[in-house]
Image: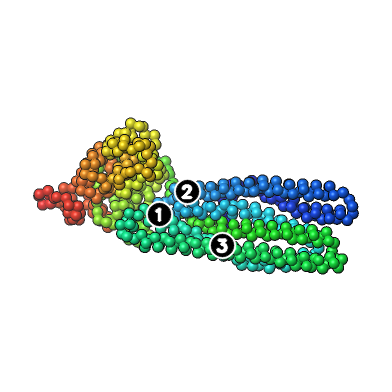
Amino acid sequence: MQILLRLLRPHLPVLALGLVLGLISNAANLAAPLATKRIIDTLGTGDALAGPITLLLVLVVIGAAIGLWQWILMGTLAEQVVLDARLSVIQRYFRARLAELTGRPTGELVTRVTADPGLLHQASSSIVGLINASLAFVATLVLMGTLDVVLLLCTLAAVAIVGLVMALLLPTISKSQKLAQDAVGELGGELEGTLRAMRTVKASRAEERQGGRIEADARRAASYNIRAARRAAWVWTVSWSGVSLAIIAVLGVGAWRADAGLLEVSSLIAFLLYAFQLMGPIGELTQNVTALQSGIAAARRISEVYAMSSETSDPRPSAAIADAPVLAIEDVSLRYAEDAPPALDGVSLTIPSRGHTAIVGPSGAGKTSLFSLLLRFLDPQSGQIYLHGRPYRDMTHSEIRAELAYVEQEAPVVPGTIRDNLLFSHPDATEEEVRSVLDRVHLTDKVASLPDGLDTQLSGAELSGGERQRIALARALVRTPAVLLLDEATAQVDALTEAALQNSVRERASTAAVVTIAHRLSTVVEADRIIVLDHGRVRAVGTHESLLASDDLYRGLVEALRIAVPSGAAA
């Protein structure tokens, strides 16, 4: 409810107007049975019927017009609340720490933007509906009491029984809706991951097995939704049947009292009209409470997104130090959990403002963890990182990343055109800069062959994995950052293209810092300096030749990479 009320708070004036319109509409509807009683009473006196009939028509028209206005107003409000919820979730995603997002299936995150806020559509106006329906319900009972107290007591007894049954059933609807949405989220995550790996699925002849797992998630979501639908069906059936039985009882008792001369026939007819009209508030109460339960289930899942920890900074004014290295790491330690072994343990190193630094080490040595710290995807538990002599803790995430360009090993491209991708980090780059970077990554001819050139949508472009990787590399090269971070960005390109890209790296290293996680032979040999990581520690630092001569682990890595050791180099 707190999440739902937070989303409704900016729309309080609209909610208030909707409430007023609902009250006016209910007042017009409540006056209609009394106007009908007046018409019947007039028949016995012989007075003119034009006045009472005109009054009844006016009440009907006013009720319909106000009701239409309120319906449109609340429908618009519902869509705005759904939009606000989606925007707030999207904003939370982009502010969240990377670990909060990478630890969840992508498809499951998507459903919290698409499916979950949709359940708020009816719930957003349900609060106004509940207030209006409650007031209409009470007002109807009061007017019924003015006509006949005995019949009112019969009606209240039936309403009490219906209310008790609904109070037992309604909480189960919210629980079933929450479980159903959780299952839909798991379905989206499983399906998204499977579609990404469809080549592997088909090559492994695993279509039926993987399809069965996804179908099981779909069936589980359906079972929870069916359970919620059954609960809702019981609620509706009990409410409508209870009111119908109450009307039958009222009719029987009222007919007996009218026959005994204890109740006027016109009062009995007006009471019956109110009894029939009572079904409206009861149905509206049932519908709004059911919608509110679904909205609460969605709000619970949205609240889980709100609970994600965000990237926070406490920027403090400080100046860069002219002679400081571009990056300096001092006694940094990192753990992914309190009881986990350290991913980095007391790491200290510097990255000069120019040159190519390669980071090597066995799997699990801490190479990716080091990059995550440099990009401030994570913060260390101890130690300090400096950029141009300024502590990371004194800078915002945006300030730090403005000085860095990063190309992942998988080199993902973002949705949009080739031009969108190239300008992603540097939107004000000129056409000449874009053409220049395309030449450097050997993509000019490929782009020229595409129907729409730079404006070709990547989703439909026939590009190989290597070509997509070159687009990702070009996206970083079009900028002029202080540090270029490459997680072996040439892993999927051919030898000739790799040689050209290495030339680009050397060119960039002559004016800025290039740091590479090295998995390829050429990267290791070409680097000006090599840092060897092992078990989260800096084991050795040096050139290719010096490390071949001095470090056993590095020699083993070199042999695994099948680099020919120059004769006498290891002596």
Q: Quadrant of residue 186?
A: bottom left
Q: Is residue 398 left or right of residue 353?
A: right
Residue that appears at 68% across and 66% down? 242
Q: Cα distance, mark 1 to mark 3?
A: 27 Å
Q: Earlier in the sequence, mark 1 or mark 3?
A: 1
**Callout 1: few (<14), some (14-19), or many (20+) C-alpha neighbours within 10 Å?**
some
- Between circles 1 and 3, the one closer to the viewer is 3
Picture coordinates of residue 127 (x, y %)?
63, 54
Picture coordinates of residue 53 (x, y %)?
81, 49
Q: Is residue 3 left or right of residue 405?
A: right
Residue that appears at 33% across and 57% down? 202
Q: Which residue is mark 1?
A: 192
Secondary structure under badge 2? helix
Q: Earlier in the sequence, mark 1 or mark 2?
A: 2
- Amino acid type of the residue tagged 3 in the rendering: Ala
Q: Cα distance, mark 3 to mark 2?
A: 30 Å
| Quarter of the image with the N terminus in it | bottom right
Q: Earlier in the sequence, mark 3 or mark 2?
A: 2
- Amino acid type of the residue tagged 2 in the rendering: Ile
- Amino acid type of the residue tagged 1 in the rendering: Glu
- Is residue 315 among the parts visible in the rendering? yes
What mark, if any, has residue 90 been given in the picture? 2
**Callout 3: few (<14), some (14-19), or many (20+) C-alpha neighbours within 10 Å?**
some
Choose between 454 and 366: the one closer to the eye.
454
What mark, if any, has residue 229 been given in the picture? 3
- Between circles 1 and 2, the one closer to the viewer is 1
